[in-house]
Image: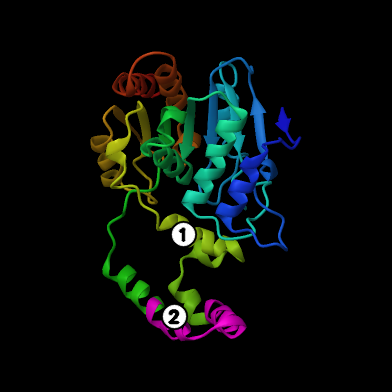
Amino acid sequence: MVSDTPARNGDASSVIDAFLGAGPGNLPLSYERLHIDVSGPESAHPVVVLHGWGSSARLMSPVAATLSSDFFVHNIDMPGHGLSPQPPAPCGLEEQASLVRQYIEDKLSPPVILFGHSNGGRIGLYLASRPDTAHLIDKLVLVSPSGIRPNRGPAYYFKSNLAKLLKLPTRFLRGRFKEHVMDWLTHSLVWKMLGSSDYNALTGTMRQSFVATVNFHVDDMIRNINCPTLIFWGDKDTAVSLRQMQKLESGIADCGLVILKGAGHYGYLDQPGVVMAATRHFLGAGDANEAVHDAATAAASAT
């Protein structure tokens, strides 16, 4: 079923609104305004499904549908994605995690299982690593999670430093004039040449949200994660590297890594049988490394 009846969360929405810095002329953003697909028996263990940047709950629906036979599944469209509205103010990783946290605390019975793809995985890693939210997460299932700092080449640092140089004069400007100059700069041809295709495709608060999100790294936080964690990575993935996944595997105490042969960044769509067989085993009984063995068995039987 689709949950489109606004929840009532009392003071929680005001906390989130203050956290997001919503202006008086904007509709405040809270989880009440997010589109969330809810399925499965309400008495079952809750699962929160989080998509990646530029994706949606719709693309995660095969995962939600498979898990809903045994779990109470909540498949969330994050701000500015799918059927959820754009945030009234920039919404970085910490703000996104705050929305998920409030939803879990107000609407579910934690700890929950969190299934995250890409940036959804980054949110899961953040929540599981923090002392004030780790108790909310029972297990993590992550597909090509982002959040580990990538190796950058000379071209990246050239563009990054040039962008900082172009923005430097605006530090001495104030008020509306500064806003107009920044608007002109960010819409200029030079600025577009410096930005990625993902960045250039965005408008409004989503551009600032994207920058704040992709520049948030969890490298120094993962050693605090104690919940069992299962990671899937496709060997054709060009968005995140095997090195990044191995850093997660070695940094998290109870963690297993499944390499999906021939799969790309959307491994749960490229190899759904392997991903869901290993996930169901992991969530039913056994640890992360046993689930890796189960995934290898499933992959062998499929070929």
Residue ID at (56%, 19%): 71
Q: Position of residue 235 (x, y in %)?
A: 34, 41
* Residue type of the residue flagged with mark 1: Ala
Residue ID at (42%, 29%): 135
Residue ID at (65%, 55%): 86
Colour mode of the rendering: rainbow
Quick check: 244 above or below 256? below
Numbered disc 2: secondary structure: helix
Quarter placement of the C terminus: top left
Task: Judge the density around disc 1: few (<14), some (14-19), many (≥20) Cα neighbours within 10 Å.
Answer: some
Q: Quadrant of residue 58?
A: top right
Q: Position of residue 23 (x, y in %)?
A: 66, 62
Judging depth in this view, the residue of 195 and 42 nearest the camera is: 42
Counting residues from the start of the chain, the first of labels 1 and 2 encountered is 2
Residue ID at (59%, 36%): 103
- For the residues labelled 1 and 2, the Cα–Cα distance comes to 16 Å
Circle number at residue 212: 1
Taking the magenta stretch, the answer to whether it contains residue 178 is yes
Numbered disc 1: secondary structure: helix
Q: Position of residue 294 (x, y in %)?
A: 35, 19
Quick check: 111 above or below 17? above
Q: Which residue is mark 2?
A: 167
Quick check: 10 above or below 238? above
Whether residue 18 is visible here, answered yes or no, is: yes
Residues drawn in magenta: 164-188
Taking the magenta stretch, the answer to whether it contains residue 146 is no
